[in-house]
Image (cartoon, rainbow, N blue to C red):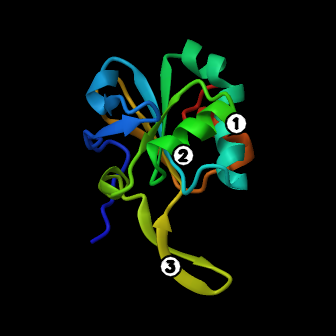
Amino acid sequence: MMIQLNEGSKAPVFKGKDQDGKGLSLDDFIGKKVILYFYPKDNTPGCTDEACNLRDNYEALFSRGFAIIGISPDSEKSHMNFKKKYQLPFSLIADPDKQIIKAYGAWGEKSMYGKKYEGVLRTTYVIDEEGIVLKKISKVDTKNHTAQILKELGIN
C-alpha cells in the first residue's frame, strides 16, 4: 500500500541515526521549519547536485528558519563520507530498512531503460514548526532545488 502524504497532513514522526550515529527525530525540530528530502544514493550525480545546491544555499535557508535533513537508504558510514566529501552543513539520516522512507511515501516503482524496479522516489517535504506538511515536491529539480523550494513556498 502506497502512503499518500499531502500538504496539510501531519508529518510522520521519525527516529533515525545520522552520519555520526547520533539519534535524530522530527520532534527535535519542533519550532523550526524543516526541509526533509529523500534521495536515492550518496555520491550519485543527481543526489550530489541536490545536496550541493542545498549546501550552497544553506545560509539563505537557515536565515529563514529552515533546518535541512537528507534521508536515503545508505549506511551511516556512507553518509559520513558523503557529508565530508562535499562539506554538507546538515544531517543525513541512514534508513537502510527504509522505514522512514516508506512512512513518507518516498518508496515505490521506478523505471530505468524500460526496466521497472522498486526504489527511493526523490521527494522533498517542507514541514512547518508544528510538524504539518506545508509542501510536497515530487518533481525535484536537483540543480536548482533551493530556488524550487522557495518558489513553491512563495518566498522570493
Residue at x 49% of width, y 16% of height: 65
Residue 148: % across, % down? 65, 40
Identity, as a three-letter code, of the amino acid under mark 3? Tyr
The dot on residue 117 is 3
Callout 3 secondary element? strand
**Circles 1, 2 touching at the beta carbon (< 8 Å):** no
Residue found at the far front of this picture: 77
Mark pair 3, 2: CA separation: 23 Å
Q: Nearer the viewer, residue 22 or 34?
A: 22
Q: Quadrant of the C terminus?
A: top right
Q: CA distance from mark 1 to mark 2?
A: 16 Å
Placement of the N terminus among the 4 image quadrants: bottom left
Q: Position of residue 93 (x, y in %)?
A: 43, 40
Q: Which mark is residue 52?
A: 1
Label 2 sits on a secondary structure element that is helix
Q: Nearer the viewer, residue 107 or 91?
A: 91
Is 83 or 9 nearer to us in this picture? 83
Give the residue type at disc 2. Answer: Ser
**Residue under numbered circle 2:** 78
Q: Secondary structure at mark 1?
A: helix
Three-letter residue code for mark 1? Cys
Q: Quadrant of residue 21?
A: top left
Q: Which one is nearer the viewer's eye here, 101 or 75?
A: 75
Q: Residue at x 60, y 34 (%)?
A: 83
**Residue 147 against residue 32 in the figure, above or below:** below
